[in-house]
Structures are given as structure tokens and as C-alpha cells.
Amino acid sequence: MTPLQRAWAFYVRATARFPAVRSIVPFVPVVALWAIVSYADVFPRAFFPAPGDVVRSFGDLIYKGILPEYLEDSVVRLAVGAACGMALGIPLGVAVGLSRRAHAALWPLLLFFAAIGDIAWLPILLIWFGFGLTTMTFVIVYTVLFPVVLNTALGVRSVPTELHRAALSLGASRPRVVWEVVLPGALPNIMTGLRNGLGYGWRALIAAEIIVGTSGIGFLMFDARRAGSVVEIVVGMIVLGALWYIVDGWILAPIERATGQRWGLVTR
Amino acid sequence: MSSLTIKGLSKTYFDAYAAAHVTAVQDVSLTVREGEFVSIVGPSGCGKTTILNMIAGFVKPTGGDILVGGRAVSGPGPDRGVVFQSFALFPWKTVLENVAFGPKMRGVGKAERDAIAREYLALAGLAHAADRYPNELSGGMQQRVGVVRALANEPEVLLMDEPFASVDAQTRMTLQEELTRIWQERRPTVIFITHDVGEAVFLAERVVVLSKGRVLDEIDVDLPRPRAWDALTEDGDFKALSARVLQMVRSA
């Protein structure tokens, strides 16, 4: 056994016991490279802060209470927007997926409006609603809505006809078929739509915060640019990435493991 | 009393691409007594699945009547249980939940419908699989669940559409033997669609031979029960009957 194999065996055993290790280790070389480049003073530190500077700034922003407050603002906006987007998107997607007529009438419109993505609406929304919460909520709901509708409709249509027929010949009414067959059958696609929707929504939110700008992570970053503080911009970028990582790992992935993967609808 | 009566049943499609009418089923009449097991056999494209889909209420006939227990069929309903070739189990429900689905739709309470489901699962030797998901079972076990799910709803007629066509040959023989055993115990009215002549004769009391959407002939099968493949493969009557039906299907 070479030392390399020994190290590999140690890693495999460690990740088996502490799965969190697996989600941290890939970042080690990235951070190391970043540290080497910054401490070697290839670039001026004011433009290219070192990991230590960023950690210090991170602690500072938390201590001042700015980061927790802005983070809360951003996350609440996204959560409210995503909830509204799903509440509208899933029923609409089911209707479009089930009814030939609704599909014929709505699909072209959906594709058209899906293409006028999020921030392309900002100019007109700023005129209509001004620099406020309404504008930001509209943008997020809009962004979350389309991936959810389109994927839900796709999922609904992918449920085999035989399953509808089986439920009907076991005595299910049409509404029961939607609840017992269509929704669970479409769930893997709904999750995909939600994943995309949240991803796009998160990006749209940051963009909206930069432009609308009263609070939030996007505002923090843009405000830092005004103050010429590269280190705070980097803090904002890392927070964005880390937050998505957490949403995916702690919320979306476990749901997918418990549903579509468990049922054999999606291969692992 | 007849459980199922079909009179002058027809189905014509309009094929828009070919700009022509296609006749899938033409003037089919059939009476099935309560507790009878009837096989419908014929080559692919003879309209047997279309007939079953019309009885199940999935497809609307263009002519004729279908009566189940005296009532006209107007759509799918729990009085006609269906077993599909593709099993059509609900992947997101456990085996127990699948079997309890029919009673659940009737409004039977959880404890009672679980008891019903367990009783029927035991009938097919599936008690141990109750809490598993369908994708964790072999094809043969999945179709046992499919049969049991339809039976647990106590339909007036059980419609089986080539249910054993997608399992391996050995499992198929086992499933056929189990089906004859369950049929003898419970005496459901069964319409069994197949293209396999041996299967049709082995299972049924009466074999209906179908060709080009018409009934070619009906043959009574008076083989003794219980039926098992070991005894029947060498049985003269079985071989003679199978040969007769096969000849009819091939000449069709």
C-alpha cells in the first residue's frame, strides 16, 4: 500500500463517517491557490484581497449586524417570491399539462413571456412601482414562475396514460387522479422546475437589489463597490455561493432522495 | 345471469394521415357468465386490446352496446378491474398502498382497507412485500401486485390485457398457475387477452378466437381443474385443443 493509497483510504473512511467532509474538501485546493496568489502579492491587495482579509471583513460585517440583516432581507424576499411563484406555477402547470386546450392557448404565451427574463422587466417596473419591494417581488415571482410552470407541465405530460387509466378503473374521480397520480408523477419535474426557478430567482434578486438598492446582499456588494471595498464584494460573492450550496444540500437534494429517487422515477 | 354482454360492438378510427377510415373491431358480440374465465386470443392487430379498452371504458365504441351487470358502460369505473401489460403500479405508493387504492377511493377507512389489502396480498404470497415500493420488486412480483390490486377492489369483471407478456417464461408459467388457483378460490369473472394460444387454453373455460376485428370462433375448454403445467404439457386433450386453436389463429 503506497502512502497515496493510504491517504485515499483514510479519506474514503472519513467521508463515510462524516459526510460533511465531502462537501468541504473540494474547496481546499481552490482556497489554497487563492491564498498563494494573494500572499505572493502578484496583484495589489486592495484589488485582490487574501482569504484572511475576507474572513476578517466577514466577521466585521457580522459584528456590525449588517450582514445578518441584509442576508435576512434577501432570503425572505426569495422565500416569499418562490412561495408565490410555486402557488401560481404548479396549478397553472397542471392545467397546461392536462388540458389540450389550455396547452394550445397558453404554451406560446408562456414561451414568449419566459423569454423576457427577469431583469428585462426592471425598467418598466421601476416606472410603474418605483424603487421598492413591489418591484423586487414582481421580478422574483416572475422568474420563479416560468421554470415551475414549464417543468410542471412537462412532468404532468410524462405520467403514463396507463396510470391515469389504472386509477380511474379503481374508482378514482378526476380530481382524485390529479392528487393521487398526476402530482406525485410530476414531482421530479416540479423539483427540477423549483431548482431552476430558485437559481434564476436568486440571481434576479441580486440584480434587482443592485438596481433597486435599499438592502440585501446585492445592495451590500454594490454599496461596497461605491466605497471601493473589494474585500466586501468578495464576502458578498462567497455568501451567495455558500447560501445556494446550503439550500441545495439541506432542502432540495433530501427531498429528491426521498421521492423520485426512492420511487425509481429518476436514476441516482 | 350474465355478467358481461357485448352486442354488435364496433370501432372505426379515422386516420387523418392516410385520410381513410380504419376498422379495428367489427360487429363483435359476446356473453360472459358470472364467474366465467374467457380468453380472447388472436394475432397482433386483430383488435383484441381495442375490445378490452372499450369494455374498460378507456375508448368509446363507434357502435354497439356493452352491458356490465345490466348497466351500460359509459366510462372507466370500479365495476371493471383492469390488469395492464405494463403493470401500471403507482411508483410512489408502497405495495400495500397500491392494493388498498381501490378501497381508499370507495371511502373505506385506513385500518379496514389495509386489512383488505393484506388479505389479498397473502392470497398471492406477497405479505412480506407490503411495505416495499414497486421499483424494488421483480417484474413477476410487480404483476402479482397488479392482479391483486384489481381483485381487492372486487370488480364485477376482471379485464386482463396480456398481463404476463412482459415477464420471463418460467415466471409466466408460475403466474398462470397462480391465476388459475386464485380464480378457483374466488371465482371472479375474467376476460383475458393474449396472443399466446397455450396460455389462453390453459387458463380459460372458453377461448374466443379473433381475427381482423371479428370473432372467428368460440371453443369450450373442458379440461379438469386444478390445472398445472407439469400435468397438462403431456395431456392429450390439452394438446389437441391448443393445436386446434393455434391452427385457427394461424389461418386467420
Image (spheres, coloured by chain):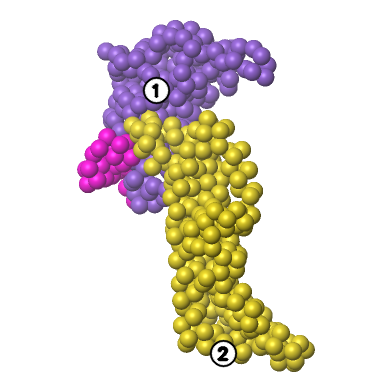
Position of B133 with respect to A103 (left or right) is: left
Q: Nearer the viewer, residue A129 or A136?
A: A129
Question: In the rendered view, would you say B39 is above or below A243?
Answer: above
Where is residue B100 shown, x and y percent of the image? 31, 41
Q: Which is the main secondary structure of the residues drawn in magenta?
A: helix
Q: Quadrant of residue A120?
A: bottom right
Where is residue A80 shown, x and y percent of the image? 44, 60
Determine which residue is flagged by label 2: A56
Q: Is residue B120 magenta?
A: yes
Q: Are marks 2 and 1 in contact (CB under 8 Å)?
A: no
Q: Tell me which amino acid carries mark 1.
A: Gly
Q: Is residue B114 visible?
A: yes
Chain coloured purple in the rendered structure:
B
Label placed on residue B236: none
Q: Is residue B152 visible?
A: no
State the count of labels. Answer: 2
Q: Quadrant of residue B145?
A: top left
Local SS, label 1: loop
Q: Is residue B76 magenta?
A: no
Chain of the residue on which disc 2 is drawn = A
Question: In the rendered view, would you say A207 is above or below B111?
Answer: below
Residue neighbourhood size for the residue with mark 1, other residues' Cα within 10 Å, grouped as few (<14), some (14–19), many (≥20):
some
- Which color is chain A depicted in? yellow
Label placed on residue B75: 1
Where is residue B56 shown, x and y percent of the image? 41, 23
Tell me the CA gap for discs 2 and 1: 70 Å
Q: Residue at x 47, y 21 (%)?
A: B59
Question: In the rendered view, would you say A38 is above or below B43?
Answer: below
